[in-house]
Image (cartoon, rainbow, N blue to C red):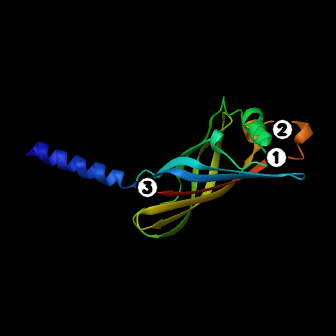
Amino acid sequence: MKSILITIFTAVIAQAGFSQIFKCTDGITKFTSEAPLEMIKATSNKTAGAIDFGTKNVAFSVAIQTFDGFNSALQKEHFLENYMEAGKYPKAVFKGKIIEDISSSANGTFSVRAKGIFNIHGIEKEKIIKVKITVKDKVVEAESDFDVPLTDHDIKIPKIVNQKIASVISVQFKANLKP
């Protein structure tokens, strides 16, 4: 009898824990470089991530190779090979914790902050990112806009193109996550 109760208790705990984890593999990450001589935009719809409402842990990752939408094929090639060095640093990753208390069981829209480590181009930087989270009928939508200074991640831009590439890149993120 004792072992049956332990098994049931463990199953209930596991079920409760699982129901608080929301995941996605098709989040959208966009970036914009608005420089004096050129605007560059690219998008990936392959952002993967998870939010654990029980522990408030968050983690999101996007493969650099999955970005598309550049002004030319040569521009994309330069982005991947020269600036991001995607072969050496294949992903951009954020891992952290939501600072404010939030529940996945109540419908609504919540403004929270996630504090963690943002790793891009092999350089980790602590970052606090504002996130709008909308919970509706067991679906969680997460949205965020934040800036990435290239110098923070040792991304070097040659002087010859410094009027075509912004020193601070604007990033937009949106994902629908499900249990």
Report x, y in % for residue 56.
47, 52
Residue in view at x 44 percent, y 70 percent: 107
Q: Which residue is mark 1?
A: 167
Identity of the residue furthest to the right in this view: 160
Instruction: Say whether marks 3 and 1 touch (CB < 8 Å).
Output: no
Which numbered dot is residue 157?
Answer: 2
Say which element carries label 3: loop
**Distance from Cα at disc 2 to Cα at disc 1:** 8 Å
Instruction: Say whether marks 2 and 1 touch (CB < 8 Å).
Output: yes
Residue in view at x 67 percent, y 34 percent: 86
Q: Is residue 133 left or right of residue 52?
A: right
Q: Is residue 11 left or right of residue 18?
A: left
Q: For the C terminus, give its image quadrant.
A: bottom left
Which numbered dot is residue 66?
Answer: none
For badge 3, the amino acid type reads Phe
Seen from the viewer's position, the closer of residues 71 and 133 is: 71
Report x, y in % for residue 64.
65, 40
